[in-house]
Image: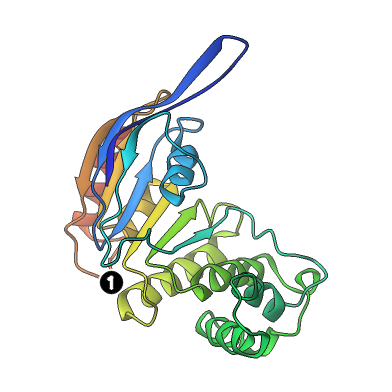
């Protein structure tokens, strides 16, 4: 739960407010955060991840234990280590957590298989296509078996067909329950992507970001982009964004 959080950056006595008093409860859902470029979407995502702290307000995690939930982060660019294979890239965060190498590689192999790269585990990043690299990125985020999966415009650098395929695969993973992920938070600037993937869409204002609207996407899955209902909801979200 985001409880009235704000974020300011500043130096030499000057400050810029990026996030302004945002309160939001995130349940077991696929949540999209939509807003204009530079409004603070990625900053908000980093605060949810715990990478950055809010200047004011608090983030409360409702978990079964007293600790914070595990978080997986899918970046806009894959950021794979070039001298490691796909398998080694996915296993790296597991080894960093103290998991023995053999066990880490078994887990990594399972998640590479989940994203359809079981035959490419020994390939290096420069031997993989852009879509394959992003699949490795997703497998790496899922391999730590997070409760919350955070995604920062993960499809924006891909060609349309590859992006479409990855969206469908990610939704299949999310809906099938094959991973322990309970909540997905997707930052995007693509209205159609948000309506296609999300249960709810949070629309932010220009900087400093405030919540302008929250739209519930009450459409059955799998969603049909050609249906009148889908088109009407896309038009409504465009209206709110503009």
- Please, what secondary structure does the residue beneath circle 1 have? loop
Q: With respect to residue 241, does 51 lie above or below?
A: below
Please say whether residue 136 is visible from this viewpoint.
yes
Q: Position of residue 83 (x, y in %)?
A: 83, 70
**Rendered residue at 73%/73% (across/down):** 128
Between 137 and 221, the one nearer to me in the picture? 137
The single residue placed furthest to the front in the displayed view is 66
Colour scheme in use: rainbow
Q: Nearer the viewer, residue 221 or 80?
A: 80
Residue that appears at 19% across and 67% down: 220
Give percent across and percent down for residue 138.
54, 68
x, y (%) of residue 41?
44, 39
Q: Quadrant of residue 92?
A: bottom right
Q: Residues within 10 Å of mark 1 (few under 14, many from 20)?
A: few
In depth, the one of 9 and 210 nearer the eye is 9
Nearer to us in this view, 17 or 11: 11
Outermost residue to the right: 83
Q: From the viewer's perspective, is 154 left or right of 190?
A: right
How many numbered marks have been drawn onto this rendered protein structure? 1
Q: Is residue 145 left or right of residue 105?
A: left
State whether residue 13 is above or below residue 100. Answer: above
Look at 49% across and 72% down and name the residue there: 142
Does 203 sit left or right of 232 as displayed? right
Q: Which residue is mark 1?
A: 222
Viewport quadrant of the C terminus: top left
Residue in the image at 50% along x and 41% along y: 52
Expressed as whole percent of the image width and height from the top left, the position of residue 225 reads 31, 60
> Is residue 189 in view from this perspective?
no
In the shown orientation, is residue 186 left or right of residue 91? left
């Amino acid at each position: 739960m985001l409880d009235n959080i704000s974020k300011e950056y500043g130096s030499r006595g000057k400050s810029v407010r990026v996030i302004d008093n945002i309160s939001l409860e995130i349940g077991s859902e696929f949540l999209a955060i939509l807003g204009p470029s530079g409004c603070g979407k990625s900053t908000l995502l980093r605060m949810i991840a715990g990478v950055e702290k809010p200047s004011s307000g608090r983030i409360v995690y409702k978990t079964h234990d007293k600790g914070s939930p595990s978080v997986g982060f899918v970046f806009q660019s894959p950021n794979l280590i070039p001298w490691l294979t796909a398998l080694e890239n996915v296993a790296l965060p597991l080894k960093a957590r103290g998991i023995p190498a053999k066990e880490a590689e078994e887990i990594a192999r399972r998640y590479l298989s989940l994203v359809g790269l079981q035959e490419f585990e020994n390939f290096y990043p420069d031997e993989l296509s852009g879509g394959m690299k992003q699949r490795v990125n997703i497998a790496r985020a899922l391999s730590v078996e997070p409760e919350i999966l955070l995604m920062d415009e993960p499809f924006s650098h891909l060609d349309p067909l590859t992006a479409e395929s990855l969206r469908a695969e990610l939704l299949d993973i999310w809906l099938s329950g094959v991973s322990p992920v309970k909540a997905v938070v997707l930052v995007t600037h693509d209205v159609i992507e948000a309506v296609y993937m999300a249960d709810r869409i949070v629309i932010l204002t220009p900087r400093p970001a405030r919540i302008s609207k929250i739209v519930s996407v009450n459409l059955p899955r799998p969603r049909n982009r050609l249906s009148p209902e889908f088109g009407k909801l896309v038009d409504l979200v465009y209206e709110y964004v503009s």
